[in-house]
Image (spheres, rainbow, N blue to C red):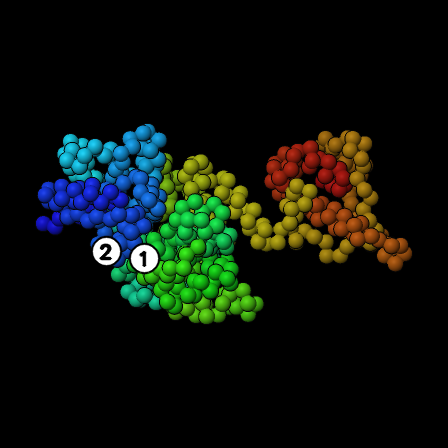
Amino acid sequence: MKKHLVAIVDDDKAFGAYLKTFLSLRGYDARTYGRGDEFLASIRNAEQPDVVLLDVMMPGMDGVETLKSLRASLPDLPVIMLSGNSETPTVVKAMQAGATDFIEKPDSPEALGEIRLEVVLKNALERKRLTSELSELRQQLSDDEDQAMWGASEKMKIVAQMIEQVSDSDVGVLIRGESGVGKELVTRAIHQRSTRKAAPFVKVNCAALPPDLLESELFGHEKGAFTGAATTRIGKFEQADEGTMFLDEIGEMKPALQSKLLHVLQDAEFTKLGSNRPVNVDVRVIAATNRDLEAMMLKGDFREDLYYRLKVIEVHVPPLRERRDEIPFLIDFFLSKYSSKWKKPVPHLTDTLHGMMLSYHWPGNIRELENMIKQVVVLQDERMVIKEIERQQQRAQGVVVMAGASIGVSAMPSSLPATPVPPPPPVGAAPAAQDDDEDGDEGEADDSGEDAPDASEGGVSLSEVSRAASMKAERALIEQTLQQVQWNRRKAATLLGVSYKTLLNKIKECGISR
C-alpha cells in the first residue's frame, strides 16, 4: 500500500527534521521545506502531497500567504497550520484563508504526540478522500450536463466531433461565437477529454480587468512591484501549470500585453512583475472571442503573430437561432435543473410561450434562454417572460418607443404633412375625454392631406414635421388598438403601456372617435 505523502513547510529546520522522523516512524512519507515559495515551486515539478503541515510565521512569504496561493491552484489539498502563537486573530486568519485545521506547536519536539497530530492527520486524509469522491461525482454530473448542452442539431454534432479530435493534442484552439452560445462549455469539454484533465483548469476573462491588473492576474508579481503589492503573488499561468488556461474575450487584451502572451506561447516562460527571474510553465492555452479578430488585425489592434499562434484549430459555436430544434430540449433541461436546485415545482409552459420561444431570435443565445427559465421557475409565472420576448421582438422589428407607447414603423405616415399639427392645449386647459360622445365636436382628423397647402407657401421647421409624423403615428396605433379591444379604453391603455388618463388625453388630442 502506498504511503501518504506529507509536506512539512517550516523555517525551523530542527523542528522540521524531528517532525519528519516522527511521521516516518508512523508510516508516512514526509518531505521538508524551509520556505513557502520553495514549497510552491516544488509542487509544480514534484509529486503532489496528500496533506501539508504549514508553519504560520516564516521569512519571506509567510504561512497564510503561502496558503492563499496554494488554495488558488489546489483548493482541495488539506493544509494543517502550525504555530507557536495560538491567539484567536491568528487562528481566524488562517481558517479564513482555507486551512483545514490549526495546531499549536508544542514547547519541544518531543511533545508532538501530546498534540494528537496523528488524529488530525487521519481526519484530514479522510476528508480529502470524501472530497475526492464528491468531486468525481460532480464531474460525472458536469460531463452529463455538458453533453446535454450539445443537443442533436447537425451543427452541434460538428462541434462535438471537433472537440473529440482536438482534445488529445496540445495545439492552440480559438473558439468563435456570439456571447452566450457556450464557448466556455466547449473549452471545459476539451480539457476534460485531454491528458491534462487531472491538472487545473483556469479561466481568465480578459475583459473583466484593466490592462495593468490583468498582467498581474496572468503572470503574478513580486512584493513591492507596484503600489499596493504588499506580498508576492502567484499568477494564473503558474496556477494552471500542466493544465489548461482559458482566455475568454481575448479580443479585449491590449497589444502591449499581447506581446507578453505571445512570448509565453512561444517559449513557455515569463517573468513576474518586479522580477527578472524567468518562470517556466507547461500550459495549454485555449482562447475565445465574439469579436472580428481579422478586422482588428487590419486596424493594428490585434497582433497577427499571436492570432496565428492561437488559431491552430478554430471551432465555431453557432448561435441558438441556427439550431432551433434544440430549444425544446434545452427548455426541459433547464426547467428540471433549476426546479430541482431550488426545490420548486416544475412549471408547465403554455403553448403560447413555447411557440414564442421557438420563433424568438435569441440575441443572448443559451444564456438568455437559461435566465428566462430561471425566472419562470422562481416566480412560477411565465407572464413576465412573455412580455420580455414581446419587447425584444418589437425592437428587432424596428419598433420605437414614443410618448409611453410602442409605435411601429408600419404605423408611420408614408408622406409628411406640410402644415404642422396645432400644438395640444396646455395641461388643465381642457377636460379629458370621458365617453365616446365627448369627441363629437373635434371630428375625425383628415388623413388624406388633400387640404394641406403646398410647402412652398410657407416655411416648415424640422421640429414641426417631426411632430406631425409623431402625431399621425400615435393616432394610427391608438385607433388600431381601440378597434382590437372593441373600444375598451382601459384594456387599450394596458396594451399601449400608458395610464388610462394619458390615453384619454391622447384620444382627445388626436381627434379620435368611433
Rendered location of residue 301, percent (x, y)? 54, 64
The secondary structure type at the circle numbered 1 is loop
Q: Which residue is mark 1?
A: 241
Rendered location of residue 413, percent (x, y)? 72, 54
Q: Is residue 398 visible?
A: yes
Please, what is the three-letter code of the amino acid marked with disc 2?
Answer: Ala
Q: Which residue is mark 2?
A: 46
Position of residue 304 relative to residue 32, above or below, is below
Q: Residue at x 41, y 56 (%)?
A: 275
Near-viewer residue (104 or 340): 104
The quarter in which the C terminus is drawn is top right
Q: Where residue 144 is drawn, which disc sits there? A: none
Position of residue 106 relative to residue 4, above or below, is above
Q: Is residue 131 visible?
A: no
Near-viewer residue (338 or 236): 236
Count neighbours of disc 1 (C-alpha within 10 A) and say few if under 14, some if 14 to 19, many if 20 or more.
Answer: many
- State the residue lying farthest toward the top: 88
Question: Splitting the image into 4 quarters, where does residue 376 fall?
Answer: top left
- State the residue lying farthest toward the right: 457
Count neighbours of disc 2 (C-alpha within 10 A) and say few if under 14, some if 14 to 19, many if 20 or more.
Answer: few
Q: CA distance from mark 1 to mark 2?
A: 12 Å
Q: Earlier in the sequence, mark 1 or mark 2?
A: 2
Q: Residue at x 10, y 42 (%)?
A: 26
Q: Residue at x 26, y 53 (%)?
A: 43
Q: Indicate which label's residue lies in the foreground, 1 or 2.
A: 2
The secondary structure type at the circle numbered 2 is loop
Please, what is the three-letter code of the amino acid marked with disc 1?
Answer: Asp
Rendered location of residue 498, percent (x, y)? 64, 37
Relative to 397, is 343 on the left or the right? Answer: left
Position of residue 302 relative to residue 455, above or below, is below
Q: Residue at x 88, y 58 (%)?
A: 456
Relative to 489, is 372 on the left or the right? Answer: left
